Image (cartoon, grey):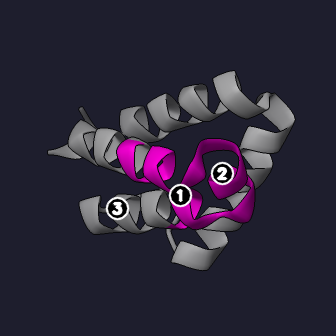
Amino acid sequence: MDISGAVQEVKKDLESTFGNTLASSIIAIARTKANAPLIGMSKQNFCDLVDSICGDNRVQSMLGAAGSKERSSKWKKFVD
């Protein structure tokens, strides 16, 4: 899967848990923290973005540490 498609899959997954507005907020904040560009994101940028999303307090609170780790592994496989 290409990076753009992978980001969309992550967003869909987050939306199913947090709703559209909160999912968008989590991704925007994570993108800033990970220094991941909107256009031309590399595989490493995507993995950094996923790490930042899974490290977000709201994600940790909702999914727990184990759930966040599971999602991280699942999402990173999108670009392998």
Return the x and y of residue 52 as percentages of the image width and height.
54, 67
Q: Are marks 2 and 3 in contact (CB under 8 Å)?
A: no
Dominant SS of magenta comes to: helix
Residue type at numbered disc 3: Cys
How packed mark 2 is, by other alpha carbons closer than 10 Å (few <14, some 14-19, many 20 or more), is: many
- Vertical arrangement, residue 30 with respect to residue 14, above or below: below
User: Residue 54 has which mark?
Assistant: 1
Seen at 53% across and 57% down, the residue is 54
Amino acid residing under circle 2: Val
Indicate the amino acid at tag 1.
Answer: Cys
Residue numbers of the magenta segment = 52-70
Residue 60 lies in quadrant: bottom right
65 sits left or right of 45 in the view: right
Report whether 77 appears left or right of 74.
Answer: left
Residue named by callout 2: 59
User: Is residue 54 among the parts visible in the rendering?
Assistant: yes
**Residue on which the image places disc 3:** 47
Q: Is the residue 27 above or below the residue 21 in the image?
A: below
Judged by depth in the image, the label closer to the viewer, 1 or 3, is 1
Q: Residue, x 47% and y 41% (percent of image)?
A: 7
Mark 1 and mark 3: Cα distance apart in space: 11 Å
**For this rendering, which residue is in front, 17 or 40?**
17
Contact (Cβ within 8 Å) of mark 1 with mark 2: yes
Q: Quadrant of the N terminus?
A: top left
Helix, strand or loop under label 1: helix
Q: Within 10 angstroms of label 3, few (less than 14), some, or many (20 or more) residues? A: many
Residue at point 66% right, 22% down?
16
Ranked by sequence position, the earlier of labels 2 and 3 is 3
